[in-house]
Amino acid sequence: MCTACACGTESAQTAVTAEAGTDDGKVYSVSGMTCGHCVSSVSGEIGKVGGVTGVVVDLPAGAVTVSGSGFTDEQIRAAVEQAGYQLASRS
């Protein structure tokens, strides 16, 4: 179930993409995302972090790719937590 909106979505069938950046970016694992509302919440909060130029969410994989420079892993963690989710790792 969606932790943010209780929409009842149990699983995702397709990837949902937010605005893409121009570089490969850093990939983070985020737990708890299940629907478009989750994607919107997470990408919106991460997009507020200074230096972030793009956010791409792969919903089925639970992965978020963040493009840009000048941001820290801790800033991304805080943004994910602000959206109501948990940052699992970064690759």
Image (cartoon, grey):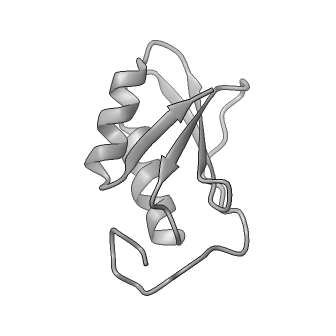
Which of 42 and 6 lies nearest the eye of the viewer?
6
The answer to whether 35 appears left or right of 82 in the picture is: right
- Residue at position x 49%, y 62% in the image: 33
Q: Looking at the image, is 17 positioned above or below residue 10? A: above
Q: Of all residues shown, which one is farthest toward the front?
A: 88
The answer to whether 29 appears left or right of 81 in the picture is: right
The answer to whether 47 appears left or right of 65 in the picture is: left
Instruction: Please tell me in which quadrant of the rendered image residue 51 appears.
Output: top left
Q: Quadrant of the C terminus?
A: top right
Image coordinates of residue 14 in percent, x first then y, are 73, 70
- Residue at position x 62%, y 60% in the image: 59
Q: Looking at the image, is 81 positioned above or below residue 6? A: above
- Residue at position x 34%, y 26% in the image: 75
Q: Looking at the image, is 39 positioned above or below residue 74? A: below
The answer to whether 32 appears left or right of 22 in the picture is: left
Q: Quadrant of the N terminus?
A: bottom left
